[in-house]
């Protein structure tokens, strides 16, 4: 159990720009912050660049020591610079890093986890948004909606050589049992799908709890619906090979919302362009991608700019999501869903 914050009024440093704060802190969480903490808010003077709605200004690394001095909790998000070990060098640094965004691997040195610092990530909350994206993409492509939409825009009508398919009862291959995969699995329940998951770290008892079956990579990747949910680690680079893509059934729907390098992008595009399969890509290798006109015009492709986890409601919920778990952990050591477990650091996204 962690040591309780000793201050009568704990101190929180918001290491995010004012624009990012407005993006990830809803009204109820802001009220909670004002009532429970002495807060060091970053101002425009602490940021770099002008930013935009899509990408607010980042925090100036030089401002971190000033804002974080004496803080019990650090609230971070996109645009927070990497936190150096020196913040904890004297053994009395912040007790919590609450990250109102996804991965923390580029934010902290894992060495601070060995010092008993509680680190929390809003990745599981973002996962729900990603799950909705994946479900929407699967349904959109299964029903061939981009093709029918394009026909209407071109002055056409029925496309008699094409007919959409249902997701209900279909086999769905899921690569990686990450938080985004688990969110999608929950959403697939009403469809009665045969959900086949490939993940070397997924135990049979946990699979049973999720209502899925574990299987080989080859079996999962032979499904008419295939969705990829792996972290960006050396073991997952090129995991979905050209051979696996060639073995997909005709008309298969592939969704990649995880990381671009996980899949042979060239092979996937080749088979989509020849009309054999359909693919929804939210991530690419490299990013942003540069595609030829025939790729951009293909009705077999649904292309989005790495926005699967980006929703208005989802973003506003992020700070509240991690702070709720952080406060509970400080109170009694409970590890809520946003707690970053040091034991799984090496395989985490």
Image (spheres, rainbow, N blue to C red):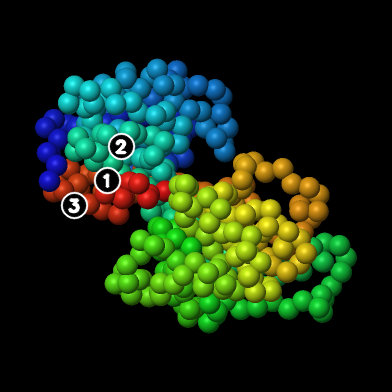
The one of 66 and 335 positioned closer to us in this rendering: 335
Q: Position of residue 270 (x, y in %)?
A: 73, 59
Residue 197 lies in quadrant: bottom left
Q: Position of residue 21 (x, y in %)?
A: 42, 35
Label 3 close to label 1 by CB (< 8 Å)? no
At 44% from the left and 25% from the top, the residue drawn is 59
At 25% from the left and 38% from the top, the residue drawn is 113
The one of 133 and 82 positioned closer to us in this rendering: 82
Which residue is under mark 3?
Answer: 334
Q: Is residue 334 left or right of residue 347?
A: left
At 56% from the left and 59% from the top, the residue drawn is 240
User: Which badge, 1 or 2, is on the more N-terminal residue?
Assistant: 2
Which residue is under mark 1?
Answer: 342
Label 3 close to label 2 by CB (< 8 Å)? no
The alpha-carbon separation of the residues under discs 3 and 1 comes to 15 Å
Q: Secondary structure at mark 3?
A: loop
Look at the picture and state if 224 lies above or below 338: below
Question: Badge 1 local density, few (<14 within 10 Å), some, or many (20+)?
Answer: some
Q: Secondary structure at mark 1?
A: helix
Residue 183 visible in the shown view? no
Q: Secondary structure at mark 2?
A: helix
| Mark 3 or mark 1, whichever is nearer to me | 1
Q: Position of residue 95 (x, y in %)?
A: 21, 34
Q: Is residue 27 left or right of residue 307?
A: left
Q: Position of residue 224 (x, y in %)?
A: 60, 74
Question: Badge 2 local density, few (<14 within 10 Å), some, or many (20+)?
Answer: some
At 19% from the left and 46% from the top, the residue drawn is 329
Question: Badge 3 local density, few (<14 within 10 Å), some, or many (20+)?
Answer: some
């Amino acid at each position: 159990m962690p040591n309780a914050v000793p201050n009568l009024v704990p101190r929180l440093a918001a290491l995010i720009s004012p624009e990012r704060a407005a993006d990830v802190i809803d009204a109820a969480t802001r009220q909670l912050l004002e009532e429970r903490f002495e807060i060091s808010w970053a101002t425009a003077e602490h940021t770099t660049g002008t930013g935009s709605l899509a990408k607010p200004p980042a925090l100036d690394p030089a401002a971190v020591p000033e804002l974080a001095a004496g803080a019990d909790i650090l609230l971070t998000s996109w645009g927070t610079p990497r936190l150096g070990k020196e913040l904890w060098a004297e053994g009395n640094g912040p007790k919590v890093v609450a990250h109102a965004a996804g991965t923390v691997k580029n934010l902290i040195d894992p060495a601070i986890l060995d010092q008993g610092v509680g680190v929390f990530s809003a990745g599981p909350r973002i996962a729900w948004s990603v799950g909705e994206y994946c479900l929407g993409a699967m349904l959109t492509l299964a029903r061939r909606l981009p093709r029918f939409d394009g026909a209407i825009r071109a002055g056409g009508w029925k496309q008699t050589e094409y007919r959409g398919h249902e997701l209900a009862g279909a086999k769905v291959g899921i690569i990686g049992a990450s938080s985004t995969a688990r969110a999608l699995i929950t959403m697939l329940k009403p469809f009665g799908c045969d959900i086949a998951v490939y993940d070397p770290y997924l135990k049979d008892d946990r699979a049973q709890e999720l209502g899925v079956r574990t299987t080989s990579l080859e079996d999962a990747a032979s499904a008419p619906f295939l969705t990829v949910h792996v972290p960006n680690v050396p073991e997952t680079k090129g995991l979905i090979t050209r051979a696996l893509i060639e073995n997909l059934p005709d008309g298969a729907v592939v969704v990649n919302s995880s990381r671009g390098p996980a899949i042979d992008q060239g092979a996937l595009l080749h088979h989509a362009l020849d009309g054999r399969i359909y693919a929804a890509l939210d991530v690419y290798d490299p990013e942003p991608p540069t595609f030829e006109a025939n790729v951009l015009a293909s009705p077999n492709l649904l292309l989005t700019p790495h926005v699967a986890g980006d929703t208005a409601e989802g973003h506003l919920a992020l700070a509240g999501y991690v702070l709720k778990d952080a406060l509970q952990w400080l109170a009694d050591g409970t590890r809520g869903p946003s707690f970053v477990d040091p034991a799984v650091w090496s395989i985490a996204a």
